[in-house]
């Protein structure tokens, strides 16, 4: 993205912090497997949102009262390390490319951060963070502030969650963010279409996983936005199943939940496919209920509605479907109000926010009421019905799991389904694997 976008965001945050405050954001740590194998790095979303910086170890400080209001601490250039792990921008790139007013090697953080924060009253940060080194420094700064206030009347006196400023900003996407999510969605739709050809009796779930993730990369995505779920048969009743190690059989379903990451922004799609190309009997009955709930939830997305409205629209249909299938008894209204019995078959909400994180930041409740939808918000619509093998459900339904998920942008006068190009009707979904 254009560096001006990040600068504009920083100006908004600097104004919100005020002259008596500062904001500190630390990059998420690198993850390792074993002694020295580093996993592919994804930077903390808040840090990226304000800076565009994506290397490990970085710490950003915004301080409105200083002429150098934007300071970055980064890994310095190191030719020996770069031979092994790739090029670094160093302090020079932090200034010249990222636009920091001041940049220092990360090794100088312990010396310089207390001086930067010593005369502020409030520190906006994520605390505790995933960075114990930064948390320790902030704790020490707060302790020093407690001592200095008694003598000088100055010094940090409170820590404020950085999300109090950043969450609302990130929840409403600007035009470039929407285009990035739109491209992640386009790539994901194309990849689902390609991967569907690998769904057949005798094939492994892992083959579907490999096919869809290869398609993400082939089209320029940085990779999946979360671990791919390729869940066949009863595995589809496990919400976040990621083993993907079972061989598929004819007549069952495969629930495929995946999404591409494009320039840091995420897509998230689920389709449930018939292995062998036919929705038979109970599989089709469950699918039809979830599809009707999916369509009703999408129809409920519009500015001024609440985040609870799509869920309630989906639940009305889902619960009546559960009654019709013989999973529960009673009136739909009473069952929805009670909640407990239907949670066995429908344990999750219908939506989550989508953006830099696949489960993006954003409040679902404000002032004790469901949050209102506004233009620029992006959310998923993903009703699901899951019947575990264990329990007292009718035998013909046991082991069936169906979820249908699309990514939806709230527009000025309604909504746009960013993943609409991927079919959801029974005949069209079946045709993708036939």
Image (cartoon, grey):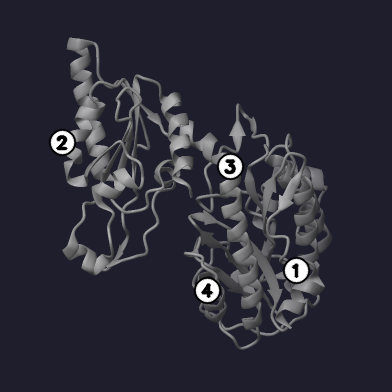
Q: CA distance from mark 3 to mark 4?
A: 27 Å
Screen quadrant of the C terminus: bottom right
Q: Which residue is mark 3?
A: 174
Is residue 39 shown to the viewer in this render? Answer: yes
Q: Nearer the viewer, mark 4 or mark 1?
A: 4
Q: Which residue is mark 2?
A: 111
Q: CA distance from mark 3 to mark 2?
A: 37 Å
The image shows residue 5, relative to residue 147, as above or below, that is: below
Of residues 12 and 395, the one drawn nearer to the viewer in this rendering: 12
Of residues 256 and 95, the one drawn nearer to the viewer in this rendering: 95
Q: Horizontal placement of 387 versus 166: left or right?
A: right
Q: CA distance from mark 4 to mark 2?
A: 45 Å
Q: Are marks 4 and 1 in contact (CB under 8 Å)?
A: no
Local packing at callout 2 (Cα closer than 10 Å; few below 14, some 14-19, many 20+) is few
Local packing at callout 4 (Cα closer than 10 Å; few below 14, some 14-19, many 20+) is few
- Identify the secondary structure beneath mark 1: loop
Residue at 80 percent of width and 43 percent of height: 333
| First-in-chain label (2 vs 1) | 2
| First-in-chain label (1 vs 3) | 3
Percent from the top left, x then y, of residue 182? 62, 56
The image shows residue 1, relative to residue 226, as above or below, that is: above
Q: CA distance from mark 4 to mark 1?
A: 44 Å
Local packing at callout 3 (Cα closer than 10 Å; few below 14, some 14-19, many 20+) is some
| First-in-chain label (4 vs 1) | 4
Percent from the top left, x then y, of residue 112? 19, 34
Q: Which mark is residue 394?
A: 1
Percent from the top left, x then y, of residue 160? 39, 28
């Amino acid at each position: 993205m254009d560096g001006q976008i990040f600068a504009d965001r920083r100006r908004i945050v600097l104004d919100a912090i005020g002259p008596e405050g500062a904001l500190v954001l630390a990059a998420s740590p690198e993850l390792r497997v074993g002694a020295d194998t580093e996993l592919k790095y994804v930077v903390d979303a808040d840090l990226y949102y304000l800076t565009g910086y994506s290397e490990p170890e970085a710490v950003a400080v915004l301080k409105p009262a200083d002429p150098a209001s934007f300071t970055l601490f980064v890994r310095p250039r190191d030719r020996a390390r770069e031979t092994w792990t790739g090029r670094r921008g160093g302090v020079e790139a932090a200034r010249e490319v990222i636009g920091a007013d001041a940049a220092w090697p990360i090794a100088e953080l312990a010396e310089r951060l207390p001086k930067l924060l010593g005369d502020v009253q409030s520190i906006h940060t994520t605390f505790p963070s995933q960075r114990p080194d930064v948390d320790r420094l902030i704790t020490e700064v707060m302790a020093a502030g407690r001592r200095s206030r008694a003598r000088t009347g100055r010094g940090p006196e409170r820590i404020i969650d950085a999300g109090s400023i950043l969450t609302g900003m990130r929840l409403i996407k600007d035009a470039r963010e929407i285009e990035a999510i739109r491209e992640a969605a386009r790539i994901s739709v194309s990849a689902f279409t390609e991967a569907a050809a690998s769904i057949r009796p005798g094939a492994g779930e892992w083959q579907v996983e490999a096919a869809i993730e290869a398609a993400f990369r082939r089209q320029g995505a940085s990779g999946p936005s979360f671990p791919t779920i390729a869940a066949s048969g009863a595995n589809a009743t496990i919400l976040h199943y990621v083993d993907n190690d079972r061989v598929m059989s004819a007549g069952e379903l495969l629930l495929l939940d995946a999404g591409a990451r494009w320039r840091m922004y995420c897509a998230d799609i689920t389709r449930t496919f018939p292995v062998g190309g036919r929705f038979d009997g109970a599989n089709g009955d469950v699918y039809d209920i979830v599809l009707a709930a999916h369509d009703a939830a999408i129809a409920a997305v519009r500015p001024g509605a609440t985040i609870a409205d799509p869920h309630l629209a989906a639940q009305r249909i889902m619960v009546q479907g559960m009654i019709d299938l013989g999973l529960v008894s009673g009136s739909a209204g009473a069952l929805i109000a009670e909640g407990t019995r239907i949670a066995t078959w429908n344990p999750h909400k219908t939506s989550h926010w989508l953006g830099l994180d696949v489960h993006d930041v954003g409040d679902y409740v404000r002032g004790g009421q469901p949050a209102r939808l506004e233009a620029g918000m992006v959310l998923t619509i993903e009703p699901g019905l899951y019947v575990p093998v264990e329990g007292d459900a009718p035998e013909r339904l046991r082991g069936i799991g169906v979820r249908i998920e699309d990514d939806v942008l709230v527009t000025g006068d309604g909504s746009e389904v960013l993943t609409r190009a991927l079919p959801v009707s029974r005949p069209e979904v079946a045709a993708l694997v036939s």
